Image (cartoon, helix red, strand yellow):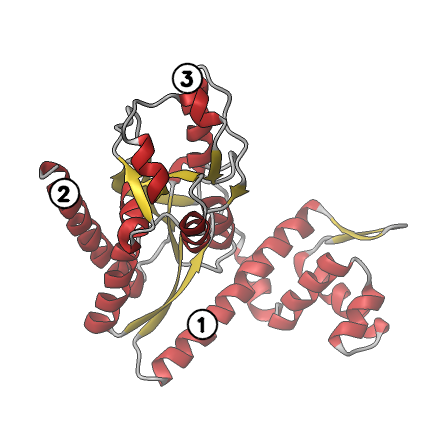
Amino acid sequence: MPASPSPTAAARLVSRLKLRHLALLIHIAERESLTRVAEEMGFSQPAATKALGEIEAIFGAPLFLRTPRGLRPTPLGERAIVRARQMLQDVDRWAAEMEAVRGGHTAHLHVGAIPYISARVLVPLVERLYERHRITISLQRATTDQLLDGLRAHALDCVIGRAAVMKGMDELRHEVLYPQRPALVANRRLAQSLARRPPDWAALAEMNWILPSPATPIGNMISELFARAGARPPAPMTETYSMDVIAGLMAHDDSLMSIVPEEIATDLSRDGNIAIVPWTFDWTLPPVSLIRRRREFTLQAEESLVRILREVCAEAAGAAAGGHDSD
């Protein structure tokens, strides 16, 4: 277990460290020059130098090294900068919660979700959270690794994504919400043509694809799918996770195809321009998980979200199972 801070060190931080000190640390880390920092923050360079001296006195050691290329953080300075960013993010979040409460809401949560989470999960989650608890949500869409950066920086409360990219992130925890299975989607005319023949992965590799980056969990699995079939992974025409972009491109180009989770494929096929190719894959996608920071205390608003999310995911999984039973 990590050593507990000494009472003297903790008391010194509580009694002497101020929010303006945190903002100064971040500005110095970004600009590497007290002159530029002083100009941006609206005070003189001697005042900036004095303020940095105050901060280093609080920590009892230098936080930055003076080099010919500017101010560079020491190991202690690097940790201080990380904590400063987290604390200022928490202050921003605190301000948003205050505004939410003043507006008649009970709390406000910042939630990240990968693009491959269907609106059939997110819409009832947002609706029920507000109807039952008057909790509002800010929703951010990005890849799991990008969202986890926000979670670790305290910009997000939780992430709905793939835990496969959590290696080495011991400060986070996750629970599996539901599995996802892949589906091949294409322009309606191309899908009808493909459905009449068995998969030929070598031929498919030469066709026009829309795929996620191979650096993502799904992108990597798709590359492995072609490799296992003895085919070269396709070079996609477009790399994107955006459902709007995939739908727009496929609707007007009968040469395009993609592999997406089944529920996303169903969403894309609703307008009739895109269809699911009825092939069965012998592999599954990494499951969808809820990822949160480990906390020493419980946030009631976050726990309310977790309960409703489990409920919505169970309903969605039941609906999907019923659909497969009727196939």
Q: Which residue is mark 2?
A: 323
Badge 3 vs badge 2, beta-carbon distance below 8 Å: no
Q: Which mark is residue 34?
A: none
Badge 1 vs badge 3, beta-carbon distance below 8 Å: no
Please determine whether, in this image, residue 321 is positioned above or below residue 40. Answer: above
Q: Earlier in the sequence, mark 1 or mark 2?
A: 1
| Residue 120 image position (x, y, % from top left) | 25, 56
Viewer-proximal residue among 28 and 220? 220
Viewer-proximal residue among 144 and 14? 144
Instruction: Please indicate whether residue 212 sits to the left or right of residue 270 in the image.
Output: right
| Residue 285 image position (x, y, % from top left) | 33, 34
Q: Secondary structure at mark 2?
A: helix
Instruction: Please indicate whether residue 68 sits to the left or right of residue 27 in the image.
Output: right
Amino acid carrying mark 1 in the image: Trp
Q: Which residue is mark 3?
A: 228
Q: Residues within 10 Å of mark 1 (few under 14, many from 20)?
A: some
Q: Secondary structure at mark 1?
A: helix
Instruction: Confirm whether residue 168 shows in the render.
Output: no
Q: Which residue is mark 1?
A: 94
Q: Secondary structure at mark 3?
A: helix
Amino acid carrying mark 3 in the image: Arg
Quadrant including the N terminus: top left
